[in-house]
Amino acid sequence: MKIIAKSLFLALPLFLVPCAFGQHQTFTVNPCASAVAFSLGGNTHHVDGTFHVQSGAVEFERSGGKISGSVVVAAGSGDSGDQGRDKKMKSDVLDVAHYAEVSFVPQSYQGAIAASGDSTVQVTGNFTLHGAAHEITVPMQLHIEGTSLTAKTHFTVPYVQWGLKDPSIFILKVAKEVGIDLTLVGNLSAAN
């Protein structure tokens, strides 16, 4: 009996390793499958456009709310379908010559991440725009299927309040906040 108990005790870590292995994971973003859409209202028009996700890798634990990593967007990739407007956005508002990247660095999350299927969490982190970091909390809808993960969120960026130039001119007025829809698609793996 003591031999069996001792054998079970020694084998216990082997059974626990897969559980721990699955708790700490890395989400590697596929930039080609991911998207950033923006929406900016105005008094005479509405502008919709996109930005390109440059890179992203996020490590997280399923319990405890620990999360780290970053998602980087190329500021110069902004495309609203109007070359003149895009040139002004890139040079006058975003100043991509000096601030080529927009990034989000998650620091914590609230909620539970299911091993598969759908989950909703609140992610808090630093959103860096125009060289300045701003703490924000965004709702994140997650869908896990096998080793694939899709993360979606919608949030608002008060860009004028954060120090960026207001592109309004004369009678053409635009909103002081821009809506962002972020979709990240990628793969899950065990974190090192």
Image (cartoon, helix red, strand yellow):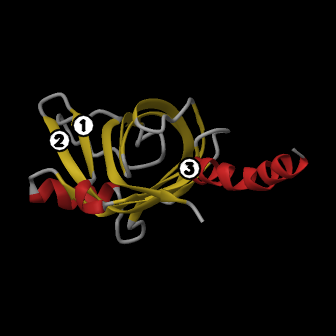
Q: Observer-nearest residue: 76 or 168?
A: 76
In this picture, residue 92 sits left or right of residue 113 = left
* Residue position marked by numbered label 2 in the rendering: 48
Location of residue 2 in the rendering, given as x and y in whole percent from the top left corner = 90, 47
Q: Residue at x 30, y 39 (%)?
A: 181
The answer to whether residue 161 is seen in the rendering is yes
- Answer yes or no: do the residues labelled 2 and 1 have beta carbons within 8 Å? yes
Q: Nearer the viewer, mark 3 or mark 1?
A: 3
- Answer yes or no: do the residues labelled 2 and 3 have beta carbons within 8 Å? no
Sooner in the amino-acid sequence: mark 2 or mark 3: 3
Location of residue 161 in the rendering, given as x and y in whole percent from the top left corner = 47, 39
Q: Amino acid at mark 2?
A: Asp
Label 3, label 1: how many angstroms apart (C-alpha)?
40 Å
Q: Amino acid at mark 1?
A: Leu
Q: Observer-nearest residue: 119 or 95?
A: 119
- Answer yes or no: do the residues labelled 3 and 1 have beta carbons within 8 Å? no
Residue 22's disc number: 3
* Element assignment for label 1: strand
Q: Look at the picture and state if 51 lies above or below 46.
A: below
* Residue position marked by numbered label 1 in the rendering: 40
In this picture, residue 116 sits left or right of residue 91 = right
* Element assignment for label 3: helix
Sooner in the amino-acid sequence: mark 2 or mark 1: 1
* Element assignment for label 2: strand
Location of residue 35 in the rendering, given as x and y in whole percent from the top left corner = 26, 50
In this picture, residue 156 sits left or right of residue 4 = left
In this picture, residue 1 sits left or right of residue 20 = right
Q: Residue at x 34, y 66 (%)?
A: 96
Location of residue 164 in the rendering, given as x and y in whole percent from the top left corner = 41, 49
Label 2, label 3: how many angstroms apart (C-alpha)?
39 Å
